[in-house]
Amino acid sequence: MKQIIIEGYLPDQILSLPDEQLDAFVLSGRPIVFRAGSAEILGEFKIKGESLIVELAQIDGGGEGVLPALNSLAQRYAKKRGLKKMEWIVHALNCAEPNLKLRRVMERRGFQIVDIEGGGKAYYQVYEIN
């Protein structure tokens, strides 16, 4: 399987960056736009207590396994940081042009549709890190 390049880095290269550098750019408390494979993604990553929260607001393009690649990277990062849970919030329900393939993927992976405080309905999943 071909690895997804994220902003010019392979997942292992991202994981080898110093925590301070990742915290400054990725866990900044602000939404960021980044490229993963052929997708351009607007998202926010934060640590709250013992959880890594991944919130994706917009995904343009993709289709080559970007979400599973992000999930794998986020899970490895959470383990490295000693976190216990991952929480995913994907705002993909009220798009002007909904991606039906994404909907099938989210449902197959066990995401639930929930009301996010201040954010409307979104796909949501929380799970323990092994």
Image: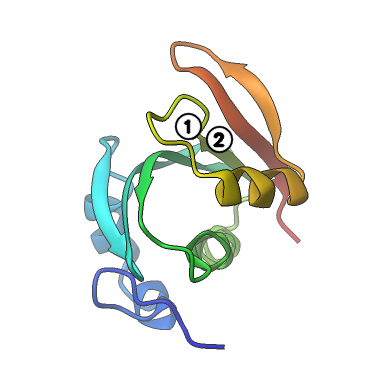
| Res 126 seen here | yes
Residue picked out by circle 1: 91
| Res 84 seen here | no
Image point 37% across, 29% down: which residue? 96
Local secondary structure at mark 1: loop
User: Could you say where residue 69 lies in the image, as x and y percent from the top left?
Assistant: 52, 68
Density class for disc 2 (Cα within 10 Å; few <14, some 14-19, many ≥20) is few
**Furthest-top residue in this view:** 118
Density class for disc 1 (Cα within 10 Å; few <14, some 14-19, many ≥20) is many
Image point 63% across, 33% down: which residue? 124
Image point 49% across, 87% down: which residue? 2
User: Could you say where residue 8 lies in the image, as x and y percent from the top left?
Assistant: 24, 77
Q: Quadrant of the C terminus?
A: bottom right
The type of colouring in the image is: rainbow
Q: Of residues 114 and 45, which is closer to you in this image?
A: 114
Q: Is 48 left, or right, of 22 in this rendering?
A: right
The numbered disc on residue 65 is none
Residue picked out by circle 2: 49
Q: Quadrant of the N terminus?
A: bottom right
User: Could you say where residue 32 lies in the image, as x and y percent from the top left?
Assistant: 25, 45
The mark nearer the N terminus, 1 or 2, is 2
Q: Of residues 93 and 98, which is closer to you in this image?
A: 98
Task: Please say if the residues under marks 1 and 2 sit with CB atoms less than 8 Å apart.
Answer: no
User: Could you say where residue 41 lies in the image, as x and y percent from the top left?
Assistant: 33, 50
Query: Gap in Å between the C-alphas at discs 1 and 2?
Result: 23 Å
User: Given the image, on which type of amino acid does mark 1 rest?
Assistant: His
Image point 73% across, 43% down: which residue? 107
User: Given the image, on which type of amino acid does mark 2 rest?
Assistant: Gly
Local secondary structure at mark 2: loop
| Position of 80 relative to 45 (above/below) | below
| Position of 72 relative to 93 (above/below) | below
